[in-house]
Each structure stands twice: as structure tokens, then as C-alpha cells.
Amino acid sequence: AQSVTQLGSHVSVSEGALVLLRCNYSSSVPPYLFWYVQYPNQGLQLLLKYTTGATLVKGINGFEAEFKKSETSFHLTKPSAHMSDAAEYFCAVGQASGSARQLTFGSGTQLTVLP
Amino acid sequence: KAGVTQTPRYLIKTRGQQVTLSCSPISGHRSVSWYQQTPGQGLQFLFEYFSETQRNKGNFPGRFSGRQFSNSRSEMNVSTLELGDSALYLCASSSQGTTNQETQYFGPGTRLLVL
């Protein structure tokens, strides 16, 4: 079974500082990985995804993530935090076998951006 | 294109009642998945429908059921509500649902409160 672990349920950064949200996955087959963001009282919005090919993935709003197979990691970064980045972030892995469509999510990281 | 829509957005029920939630996927999308989000358990997969057939089901009791119509709209039903069913229920759609690489697009969710 695939699983995702997000290290740090709460992360605080100052405005303009680097954002680093950690995600490690467990999968016996090549994973398909996603980062979603959730603003209060809203659904999930896709930030970026890794399927195959380039290991550095660029997403929306200046976010990017690097797939590192040797470390089983898919950490999310943004060079300079903005107040509008305050939200909850979820890493997810797509089911890698069969035709069924399922995402397994991490427990989420709440990002606070301090002025 | 309009996004995924869910109705109602908010719902209050009492224990023992049943509830039906509705989801309209993005036009042309044939796969619809449902997720439950709670503070304690996080985001958990409920089930996925494709072309009116349930293809995959998460680890939830039989009180949770769903269906999909020929126009891809989906409903989920929870019978004999329990306090623990209070949650945000998210619906997501994807175009073909034939590969786990596909992006799932989420609706805003229905927030259910069971008293």
C-alpha cells in the first residue's frame, strides 16, 4: 500500500522567507505525486504534480517540488513567502495499480506567514 | 469551463437521519471520487465512480453509499447518521479516470454537521 508522510503539521515563516514543506512517500512502484492547497472553507486546488520525466516540477503561484527517488521525498518549496500563501498544504500519491482512481493524502501542513 | 459544484454547501442533521449530497463534475469528466475530511482522520477516500459504476471503495461502513448518473453527476448518501460523520465531504472529478496520473479537480465541499 502507498502512503504519504508530511513532516510538521504547522510551519511558520516570515514574509519573504523560503517556504519548505516536507513530504515523504512510500510506494513499491513509481509513484505519481501531487501537492494540493486548501484555503479556509474551500476545496483543494492543485499546485503541481509529478508523473514522469523531469524531477523538478514547477507549479502555480511560484511553488515547485523536486522528486528524489533515493530519498523517497517530494518536498514543496517557494523562494519567497507571501501573506496569501497562508493555507493548508497536502501531499498526495496516486494509486499506482489498476484502473481505480484514488488519492492517498498526507495529514497536511498548516502554513502561517508572519508579517 | 465551470468547476466542480457541490450542493448543498452546508447541512445540519440530527443523529439517525440520512443525508444525500450532490456533485456535478466538470463538463466532460466521467470519473467522480468522494473524500471525507475531518480534523482527526484527515482526508480519506470514500469511493470512485466511472460511467455509472463504482470502481473503488474506501474503508467506510455500508451506511455510506453513492451512485452516478448517466450525465456523470454523482450523489452520496449517508444513512443512520452518527456524530462522527460530521465532516467536510469533497467531490473530485477527472476526465477519464483511467490512469493515476490524471489530475483530480475538487469542488468546494459540503460541510455536514450532525447533532
Image (cartoon, coloured by chain):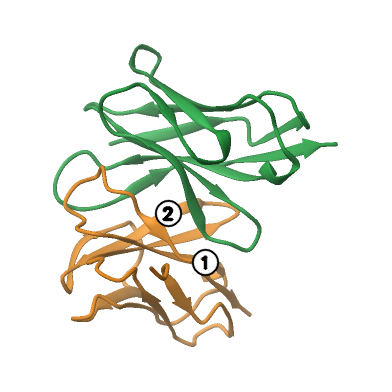
Indicate whether B74 appears above or below B47: below
Indicate whether B72 appears above or below A34: below
- Check the residue under mark 1 and report the chain it is in: B
Q: Is residue A37 left or right of residue B95?
A: right
Furthest toward the front, the residue is B1
Helix, strand or loop for disc 1:
loop
The residues bearing labels 1 and 2 have C-alpha atoms spaced at a distance of 16 Å
Of residue B5 and residue B34, the one placed in the foreground of this image is: B5
Q: Can you give x and y, in whole percent of width and height, for residue A46 in the image?
A: 45, 47
Q: Can you give x and y, in whole percent of width and height, for residue B18 in the image?
A: 44, 86
Tell me the colour chain B is drawn in. Answer: orange
Q: Can you give x and y, in whole percent of width and height, for residue B1 in the image?
A: 38, 68
- Check the residue under mark 2 and report the chain it is in: B
Q: Mark 1 points at which residue?
A: B108
Q: Name the residue under label 2.
A: B44
Q: Which residue is drawn at 26% across and 65% down?
A: B29
Q: Which of the marked residues, 1 or 2, is nearer the chain's N terminus?
A: 2
Of residue B37 and residue B15, the one placed in the foreground of this image is: B37
Q: Can you give x and y, in whole percent of width and height, for residue B103 in the image?
A: 33, 49
Furthest toward the top, the residue is A70
Indicate whether B42 appears above or below A80: below
Of residue A106 and residue B102, the one placed in the foreground of this image is: B102
